[in-house]
Image (cartoon, grey):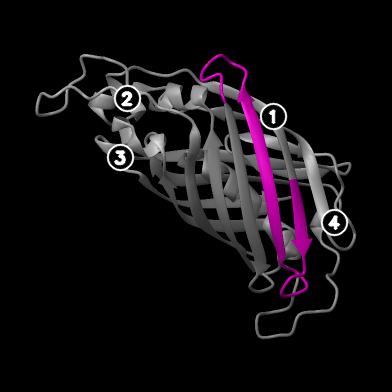
């Protein structure tokens, strides 16, 4: 599973750029044949902040509130795209027409269970705090525009990262597919499906349960568990973004709402941290505001 705090960071920032496609007339009017010029056609920067409600750790059934700053933009033909608690750089300019490709490096931070005060479960907290992982890698993708109308798109992407900070020392693969469409001149929607695959090092660090004196409420010790890699999670989220000026093509202030669900599978679900102390169903909601220059 991707922790909600991270997921919100990526999704809200994507929403800030999403209005670049919301260029048609009002919902009751027909779509124009070609998009007009917009603030997103050249260099631009989108900044924002989101407030999200998320699981306190991967597999928890307790939830926390997070506040996240967001930055996204395009400078000199190089796109800066959000990733969970990180950024991806795209060095391939989008095509003027037809299919577009993306590729470049990325970095993200993984902060699961690094602070016992944020875990919200005394038994899980008794197993100790983890180190923050710094993951470096790359991202590739392809976007298919104009599927059902002149402004929608279907995007496929794959992120691959490795920890370089000596925390989990593992690898994560994160494929996803996203459908975006404008709903009016000011409002856009995005539906995303995603999954993640982890290796044995990652699984062992976050999901194995070593011997400890931590006890369940009835006095029974939490059973040991040796986690192995494989599919970690799959999920879906829905995003709605609305430009407050009524015209998304000129930038300015936008509001964003997000709702999502993910399902832990494999050893991420079977670990006692999830199966006994938490829940393999993970929900999240978020609200955010952004401004595009």
Tell me which corner region of the image, top left, top right, bottom left or bottom right, holds residue 150.
bottom right
At 75% across and 60% down in the image, what residue appears? 20
Residue picked out by circle 1: 137
At 28% across and 38% down in the image, what residue appears? 275
> Do the residues under discs 3 and 4 have CB atoms within 8 angstroms?
no
Tell which circle, 3 or 1, labels the residue nearer the N-terminal end.
Answer: 3
Residue picked out by circle 3: 62
Residue 159 in magenta stretch:
yes
Tell me which corner region of the image, top left, top right, bottom left or bottom right, holds residue 91.
top right
Q: Identify which residue, 76 or 277, lies in the foreground.
A: 277
Q: CA distance from mark 3 to mark 2?
A: 22 Å
**Is label 1 in a helix, a strand or a loop?**
strand
Q: CA distance from mark 3 to mark 4?
A: 43 Å
**x and y percentages locating residue 32 in the rendered image:** 81, 79
Residue picked out by circle 4: 41
- Label 3 or label 4, whichever lies nearer to me, is 3
Q: CA distance from mark 4 to mark 1?
A: 28 Å
Q: CA distance from mark 3 to mark 1?
A: 31 Å
Q: Which residues are magenta?
A: 141-170
| Residue 245 at least partly seen | no
Residue 225: assigned label: 2
Depicted 195 relative to depicted 161: above or below: below
Q: CA distance from mark 1 to mark 2?
A: 29 Å
């Amino acid at each position: 599973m991707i922790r909600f705090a991270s997921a919100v960071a990526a999704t809200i920032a994507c929403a800030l750029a999403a209005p670049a496609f919301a260029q048609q007339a009002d919902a009751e009017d027909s779509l124009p044949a070609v998009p007009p010029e917009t603030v997103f056609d050249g260099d631009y920067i989108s900044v924002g902040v989101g407030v999200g409600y998320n699981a306190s750790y991967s597999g928890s059934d307790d939830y926390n509130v997070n506040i996240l700053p967001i930055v996204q933009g395009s400078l000199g033909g190089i796109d800066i795209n959000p990733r969970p608690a990180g950024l991806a750089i795209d060095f391939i300019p989008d095509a003027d027409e037809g299919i577009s490709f993306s590729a470049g490096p990325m970095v993200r931070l993984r902060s699961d269970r690094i602070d016992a005060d944020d875990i919200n479960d005394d038994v899980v907290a008794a197993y100790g705090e983890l180190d923050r992982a710094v993951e470096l890698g790359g991202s590739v993708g392809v976007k298919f525009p104009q599927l059902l109308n002149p402004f929608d798109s279907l995007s496929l992407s794959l992120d691959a990262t490795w920890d370089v900070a000596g925390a989990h020392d593992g690898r994560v693969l994160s494929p996803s597919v996203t459908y975006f469409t404008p709903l009016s001149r000011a409002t856009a929607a995005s539906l995303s499906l995603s999954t993640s695959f982890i290796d044995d090092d990652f699984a062992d660090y976050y999901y194995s349960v070593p011997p400890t004196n931590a006890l369940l409420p009835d006095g029974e010790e939490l059973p040991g568990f040796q986690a192995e890699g494989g599919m970690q999670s799959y999920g879906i989220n829905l995003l709605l973004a609305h430009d407050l000026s009524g015209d998304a093509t000129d930038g300015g202030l936008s509001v964003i709402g997000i709702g999502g669900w993910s399902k832990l599978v494999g050893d991420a679900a079977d670990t006692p941290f999830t199966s006994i102390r938490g829940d393999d169903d993970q929900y999240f909601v978020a609200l955010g505001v952004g401004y595009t220059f």
